[in-house]
Image: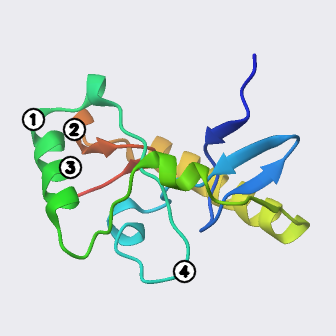
């Protein structure tokens, strides 16, 4: 389909896998967007399923001085690394944990708590 990259996976830098560049998403949005570790993370938004409360959380997040934002085009300029076996295993384990956690916990009936691919609980 002509795709060269996707916003998916975990980590702090873009990586190559099967001919695609993966731009990592936040595993824990609240923590990851404030991380001082080198690299970056992206936050995937689903405004069609966010409540007013979810939009308020997003507004507070992007106006928080501890959260450094940049345009997505900035991430597209990053040179991806080749992901090794440890990164592949780590990403798989994180994705599996997150899938099981979300299924077990749900989102408390408030789709607004779903900011991107991470469920955030009050």
Determine the secondary structure under disc 4.
loop
Lateral position of residue 114 relative to residue 64, left or right:
right
- At 68% from the left and 38% from the top, the residue drawn is 5
Report how far apart the C-alphas of labels 3 and 2 lie in the structure: 10 Å
Decide which of tag 3 and tag 2 comes sooner along the chain: 3
Determine the secondary structure under disc 2.
helix
- At 25% from the left and 76% from the top, the residue drawn is 66
Report how far apart the C-alphas of labels 4 and 1 lie in the structure: 32 Å
On the image, numbered disc 2 is attached to which residue? Answer: 112
Report how far apart the C-alphas of labels 1 and 3 lie in the structure: 10 Å
Question: Cβ–Cβ below 8 Å for labels 1 and 2?
Answer: yes
On the image, numbered disc 1 is attached to which residue? Answer: 52
Mark nearer the viewer, 3 or 2: 3
- At 64% from the left and 38% from the top, the residue drawn is 6
Q: Residues within 10 Å of mark 2 (few under 14, many from 20)?
A: many
Decide which of tag 1 and tag 2 comes sooner along the chain: 1
On the image, numbered disc 3 is attached to which residue? Answer: 58
Decide which of tag 4 and tag 3 comes sooner along the chain: 4
Decide which of tag 4 and tag 1 comes sooner along the chain: 4
**Quadrant where the N terminus lies?**
top right
Any part of residue 122 in sight: no
Question: Cβ–Cβ below 8 Å for labels 1 and 3?
Answer: no
Q: Position of residue 55 (x, y in %)?
A: 15, 41
- Out of 120 and 74, give the one closest to the viewer: 74
On the image, numbered disc 4 is attached to which residue? Answer: 38
| The quarter of the displayed image where residue 2 is located | top right
Q: Position of residue 77 (x, y in %)?
A: 61, 54
Decide which of tag 1 and tag 3 comes sooner along the chain: 1
């Amino acid at each position: 389909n002509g795709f060269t990259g996707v916003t998916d996976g975990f980590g702090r830098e873009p990586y190559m896998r099967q001919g695609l560049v993966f731009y990592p998403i936040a595993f824990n949005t609240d923590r990851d967007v404030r991380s001082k570790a080198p690299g970056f993370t992206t936050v995937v938004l689903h405004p069609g399923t966010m409540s007013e409360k979810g939009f308020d959380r997003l507004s507070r997040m992007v106006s928080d001085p501890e959260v450094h934002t940049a345009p997505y085009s900035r991430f597209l300029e990053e040179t991806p690394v080749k992901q090794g076996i440890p990164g592949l295993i780590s990403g798989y384990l994180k994705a599996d944990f997150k899938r099981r956690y979300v299924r077990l916990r749900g989102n408390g009936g408030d789709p607004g708590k779903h900011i991107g691919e991470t469920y955030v609980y009050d």
